[in-house]
Image (spheres, coloured by chain):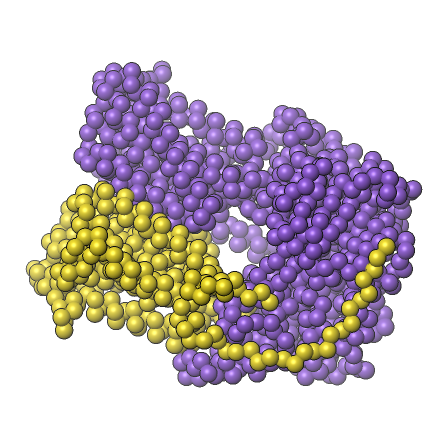
Chain colours: A yellow, B purple
């Protein structure tokens, strides 16, 4: 029989002051957006080696507007994902926004300003519906937003009568225009990203939004009114998707009934590549925007290889899949990324 | 209460160990749960494993049972040494375990759960399983209906089922993790009797508890753990109870607990006549400087009482803080009244796990931290430090995520947060659950300091020693009412445990014994016929609705009933049945498959290359099914191996697979040859053969889901993957099989679609992903996973097809096809939630 004698109470050791944060370089490396920036930089560096001319100014000018539209949709998706949800109604919302403005934007119809407003606000109502159903009844967002997407497609059918429409030339001129040499769409997307990032990171409302997203029950127990944040996320998502649709109508001139379909996967992929956790909570909109740029450049690059959309889809999907897996694996422990730069410190300090 | 003592037992040297854990180490983020722990269980002996909360007891037996994978060390079981075990493997090697919280997937029936727990050589044939289990329960004296659903039973009944299943295994090794926590006095002595019987048969028993009297009564060997290390071991007979307590705590109680004040001040919190769903007519007050404890056998309303005081809702009665009546209708109103609740489920409901220490601490004082609504990082650090500085929190920086801290540091962060919010009442649930010995001292001191500063502190704990040391008054609840009210020197571990058990015992005498109490009750299983009717109700209702739609449409236009239209309709519904089933097998495991539509397209395209003649058609069908299953396997591996969420994995593969189909057939083509088309379109008594096949597949899927081990696994994984794993279900493999099945069923739908259109078209299937979700939601399949009926899915598919057809027939806009589906999904998903809410509300009233 062995008995280890009871340990003597250790005298409290002289307490070391815990630092606020790791050194600044470490902080920057740990940002998810840093990973996305590295990925974009790497892709831009590889592009000319793979296909000459894929980073020429012509190529960039044709890539950036699409990156901007993906960014808009993906910012909304980020907000929803921060609330622990997922918005599968993005395709319907983009298409509806595009078709309303194309169908009714002419002067003989509602006129452009009214049509734009209706396209954006009308579409956003469906986001409100998803948000209320998901948040108030705590239903799985996947099922609810699939249903909302069906409702949106139904409205698309009514609005379009089954055919695409021609957008007003003024809208096309606006969407294709440049300001200070940079495409107008990039300015718009940039403004949205900056505004949303400021709201999230620098205000009390933004902090509450992240708290509720991280754990709605914990926020509830603290006495935070949690209902509104979830609803707002879905509402913003549909609002931004509708806006993206309006701009897409200008860019494409004649949007089809499936114009929005190709934005669902990129919207989610941009969020994951940008480093926002799919479990909700903290998010990075700058990361999302960089993720969108990455995807747009990737599409561009794949397009220089083959003109077949089908092959492009397969290749893009495969690369997106690999990117998502990498980001999810690295994202789970930022220390692993730090370890890539500082070998020997790859393990998180065990406390 | 009489404890059964054991007869003569063999000495340790007589036989060799049946379970040998050697040098086991296990770390979790921020905490070393086990460090070089060794343990030997000898046949025919009860080995008590002792330690405080968080000492590593449950982790250790988890390692033995295969539910925890150790970082180092070996497990010797069944004559072999293993680096790690799977729960199913451990069970097959003759180890049975009863977990602290019963690990039974809630959507399974009792008989399904028991069948899953039994190793293969102990399983009765499925056909006579119910009879066997009824008999087994009867010999044990348990009155539990084998066909009841586990989720409808109480925690105590679930516990008894697990014990009964463990006994049925006739195990070599039996592990009992705090088995008497949820049991009453008579059940406890019943259990001790069973343990004695097993001992006589030579079973080795590991018994985890923190009730010393039980150890003295039944155990021969003991091992004491503290902070993940073995601090003492030997034979029980060599120790006195006091020596054992000292070994467990590691220091005298006086140095662990802060001094209690002489007397209480004026009341800070007053509760009068508070009643809720789980407790009734509770009154007490907390004086200034006092710490009040809540105790009771698990499930007697004490947790609900604490949460209700914190604003969980559903309680009525009067609550006053410092003499003022306050509302505890919601967490918000409770918070406004200065009542702060620290729930015991730290990760789920108390902390913001992935956020930093700073963000967690200032969450209770956002107004103070962010004057004017704008963040100021420096102010946040200042506040965080002011709240946390007196605690020793082991962390690299204030920006570390709290989930990476040890249990003790997490609790300190939460206490710092509570203190920063300047509470008037602090409600703490299980303050030292998973907390190491050193941190306990700090936590007790903090709670006492808060009480002295004028905060009313209420502590709920399962550890009677802790309540004895910390509290000025302890309320013991039994069946929702205060059964004992202990003051001052009356507060002893024995009085707290005894108060709970005695009250329970007295209640037994008064009330009719509830189901599950091992008394002379005869089981009263519900008549099988009524159950069968219940299961058949849903498809019957869906079919009736279908008939109504058919009749209404035919009333508008009688040509709807013409044979050609009907046969088209039935053919089309076979496609929907198959995609519905494809979605069902994945959703039942708690996943979702968004690649169904693309798989349909791929399969149709593949078949179209072989449909020139009836001869090659068979090969085409085989290849199409294989392609679908392959897509499913890839999805499954993405989800299980690479841990990509199902929705994203299947979305990515959906795009890739659609692209692949488009590459193979850029334009619709490959028209079917006449003989092939005839073969696919063959009818049996004017019913399309494909529909017959679809119905046969439905029956097969229904059989698999309801009557096979695979089906039990699928349902268990969907209901609760952690519990399913503990039950011995191979979770990852089950998920991959579900995805592969889904792919094959989707491919079947693609073949059926090809039979309808006669042409390979890569763009034909996309709308079927939505349709598959619509079908399962209409069919009442739980969208959270765990249950669902294939028969209902077939009926729902028929209904949806009839509606779609009727809309087209009555030339409604195509928009309605989408709207009907969207509305159906939302309404069908919301209705059960509303029903559940009104049920809980009625229960609370």
B204 or A216, which is in the foreground? B204
Above or below, A206 against B677 in this view is below
Taking the image as drawn, is residue A175 in sight? yes
Taking the image as drawn, is residue A94 in sight? no
- Report which quarter residue A338 is drawn in: bottom left
- Report which quarter residue A25 is drawn in: bottom left
Identify the residue at image location x=86%, y=63%.
B243
Residue A262 placed where, x, y %? 25, 50
Residue B820 placed where, x, y %? 32, 44
**Quadrant occupied by the C terminus of chain A:** bottom right
Horizontal arrangement in the rendering, residue B703 relative to residue B490 (left or right): left
Identify the residue at image location x=19%, y=36%.
B666
Question: How many badges with numbers are in the image?
Answer: 0
Horizontal arrangement in the rendering, residue A47 relative to residue B145 (left or right): left
B815 or B773, which is in the foreground? B773
Above or below, B454 against B830 in this view is below
Residue B508 placed where, x, y %? 81, 50
Identify the residue at image location x=61%, y=42%.
B86
Q: Residue furthest right?
A: B8
Identify the residue at image location x=63%, y=38%.
B89
Horizontal arrangement in the rendering, residue B618 relative to residue B531 (left or right): left
**Quadrant occupied by the N terminus of chain A:** bottom right
Above or below, A252 against B355 in this view is above
Above or below, B565 against A271 in this view is above
Residue B103 placed where, x, y %? 64, 46
């Amino acid at each position: 029989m062995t008995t280890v004698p009871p340990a003597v109470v250790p005298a409290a050791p002289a307490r070391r002051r815990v630092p606020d944060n790791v050194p600044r370089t470490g902080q920057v490396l740990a940002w998810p957006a840093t990973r996305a920036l590295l990925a974009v930089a790497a892709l831009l560096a590889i592009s000319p080696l793979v296909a000459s001319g894929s980073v020429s100014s012509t190529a960039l000018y044709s890539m950036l507007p699409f990156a901007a539209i993906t960014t808009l949709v993906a910012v909304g998706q980020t907000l929803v994902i921060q609330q622990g949800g997922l918005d599968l109604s993005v395709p319907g919302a983009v298409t509806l926004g595009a078709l309303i403005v194309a169908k009714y934007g002419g002067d003989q119809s509602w006129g452009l300003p009214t049509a734009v407003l209706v396209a954006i606000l009308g579409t956003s109502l469906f986001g409100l519906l998803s948000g209320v159903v998901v948040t108030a009844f705590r239903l799985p967002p996947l099922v609810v937003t699939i249903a909302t997407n069906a409702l949106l497609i139904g409205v698309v059918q009514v609005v379009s009568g089954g055919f695409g429409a021609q957008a007003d030339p003024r809208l096309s001129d606006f969407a294709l225009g440049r300001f200070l040499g940079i495409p107008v769409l990039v300015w718009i997307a940039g403004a949205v990203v900056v505004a949303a990032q400021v709201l999230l990171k620098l205000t009390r409302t933004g902090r509450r939004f992240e708290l509720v997203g991280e754990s709605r029950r914990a926020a509830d127990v603290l006495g935070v009114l949690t209902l509104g944040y979830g609803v707002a996320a879905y509402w913003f998502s549909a609002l931004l998707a509708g806006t993206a649709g309006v701009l897409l109508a200008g860019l494409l001139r004649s949007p089809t009934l499936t114009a929005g379909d190709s934005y669902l996967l990129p919207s989610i992929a941009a969020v994951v590549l940008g480093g926002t956790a799919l479990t909700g909570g903290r998010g990075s909109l700058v990361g999302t925007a960089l993720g969108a740029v990455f995807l747009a450049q990737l599409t561009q690059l794949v397009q220089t290889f083959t003109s077949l959309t089908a092959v492009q889809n397969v290749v893009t999907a495969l690369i997106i899949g690999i990117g998502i897996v990498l980001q999810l694996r690295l994202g789970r422990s930022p220390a692993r990324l730090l370890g890539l730069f500082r070998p020997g410190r790859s393990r998180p300090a065990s406390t | 209460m009489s404890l059964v003592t054991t007869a003569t037992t063999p000495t340790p040297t007589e036989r060799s160990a049946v379970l040998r854990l050697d040098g086991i180490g296990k770390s979790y983020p921020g905490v070393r749960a086990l460090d070089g722990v060794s343990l030997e269980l000898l046949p025919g002996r009860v080995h008590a494993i002792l330690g405080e909360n968080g000492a590593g007891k449950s982790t250790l037996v988890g390692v033995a049972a295969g539910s925890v994978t150790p970082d180092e060390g070996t497990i010797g079981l069944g004559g072999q040494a293993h680096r790690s075990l799977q729960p199913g493997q451990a069970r097959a090697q003759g180890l049975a375990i009863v977990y602290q919280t019963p690990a039974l997937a809630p959507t399974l029936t009792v008989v399904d759960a028991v069948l899953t727990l039994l190793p293969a050589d102990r399983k009765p044939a499925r056909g006579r399983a119910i009879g066997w289990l009824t008999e087994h329960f009867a010999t044990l004296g348990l009155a539990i209906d084998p066909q009841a659903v586990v989720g409808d039973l109480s925690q105590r009944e679930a516990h008894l089922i697990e014990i009964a299943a463990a006994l049925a295994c006739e195990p070599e090794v039996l592990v009992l993790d705090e088995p008497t926590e949820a049991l009453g006095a008579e059940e406890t002595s019943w259990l001790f009797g069973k343990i004695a019987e097993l001992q006589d048969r030579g079973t080795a028993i590991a018994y985890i508890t923190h009730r010393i009297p039980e150890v003295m009564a039944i155990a021969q060997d003991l091992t004491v753990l503290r902070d993940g290390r073995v601090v003492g071991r030997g034979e029980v007979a060599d120790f006195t109870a006091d020596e054992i307590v000292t070994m467990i705590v590691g220091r005298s109680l006086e140095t662990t607990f802060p001094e209690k004040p002489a007397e209480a001040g004026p009341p800070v919190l007053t509760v009068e006549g508070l009643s809720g769903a789980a407790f009734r007519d509770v009154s007490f007050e907390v004086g200034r400087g006092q710490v009040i404890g809540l105790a009771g056998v698990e499930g007697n309303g004490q947790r609900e009482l604490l949460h209700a005081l914190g604003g969980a809702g559903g309680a009525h009665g009067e609550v006053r803080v410092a003499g003022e009546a306050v509302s505890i209708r919601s967490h918000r109103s409770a918070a406004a009244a200065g009542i702060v609740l620290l729930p015991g489920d730290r990760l789920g409901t108390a902390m913001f796990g992935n956020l930093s220490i700073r963000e967690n601490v200032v969450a209770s004082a956002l107004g103070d931290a962010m004057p004017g609504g704008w963040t100021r990082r420096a102010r946040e650090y200042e506040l965080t430090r002011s709240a946390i500085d007196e605690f020793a929190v082991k962390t690299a920086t204030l920006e570390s995520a709290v989930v990476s801290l040890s249990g003790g540091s997490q609790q300190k962060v939460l206490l710092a947060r509570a203190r920063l919010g300047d509470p008037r009442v602090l409600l703490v649930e299980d303050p030292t659950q998973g907390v190491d010995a050193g941190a306990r001292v700090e936590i007790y001191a903090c709670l006492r300091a808060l009480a002295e500063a004028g905060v009313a502190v209420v502590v709920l704990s399962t550890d009677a020693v802790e309540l004895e040391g910390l509290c000025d008054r302890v309320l013991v609840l039994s069946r929702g009412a205060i059964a004992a009210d202990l003051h001052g020197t009356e507060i002893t571990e024995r009085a707290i445990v005894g108060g709970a058990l005695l009250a329970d015992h007295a209640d037994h005498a008064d009330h009719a014994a509830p189901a599950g109490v091992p008394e002379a009750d005869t089981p009263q299983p519900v008549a099988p016929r009524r159950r069968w009717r219940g299961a058949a109700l849903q498809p019957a209702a869906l079919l009736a609705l279908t008939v109504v739609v058919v009749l209404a449409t035919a009333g508008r236009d009688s040509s709807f009933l013409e044979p050609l239209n009907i046969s088209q309709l039935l053919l089309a519904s076979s496609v929907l049945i198959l995609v519905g089933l494809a979605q069902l097998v994945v959703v039942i495991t708690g996943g979702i498959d968004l690649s169904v539509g693309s798989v349909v397209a791929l399969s149709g395209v593949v078949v179209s290359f072989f449909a020139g003649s009836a001869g090659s058609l068979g090969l085409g069908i085989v290849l199409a099914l294989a392609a679908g299953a392959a897509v499913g396997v890839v999805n499954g591996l993405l989800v299980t191996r690479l841990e990509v969420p199902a929705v994203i994995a299947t979305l990515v593969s959906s795009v890739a697979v659609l692209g692949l189909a488009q590459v193979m057939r850029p334009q619709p083509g490959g028209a079917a040859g006449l003989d092939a088309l005839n073969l696919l379109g063959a009818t049996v008594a004017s019913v399309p053969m494909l529909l017959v096949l679809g119905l046969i597949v439905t029956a097969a899927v229904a059989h698999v889901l309801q009557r096979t081990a695979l089906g039990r696994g699928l349902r268990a994984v969907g209901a609760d993957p952690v519990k399913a794993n503990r039950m011995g279900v191979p979770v990852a493999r089950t998920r991959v099989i579900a995805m592969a099945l889904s792919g094959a069923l989707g491919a079947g739908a693609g073949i059926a679609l090809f039979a309808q259109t006669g042409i390979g078209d890569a763009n034909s299937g996309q709308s079927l992903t939505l349709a598959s979700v619509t079908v399962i939601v209409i069919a009442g399949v739980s969208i959270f996973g765990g249950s669902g009926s294939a028969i209902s899915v077939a009926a729902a598919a028929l209904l949806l097809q009839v509606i779609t057809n009727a809309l087209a027939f009555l030339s409604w806009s195509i928009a309605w096809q989408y709207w009907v589906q969207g509305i159906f999904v939302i309404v069908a998903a919301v209705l059960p939630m509303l029903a559940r809410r009104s049920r809980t509300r009625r229960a609370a009233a």
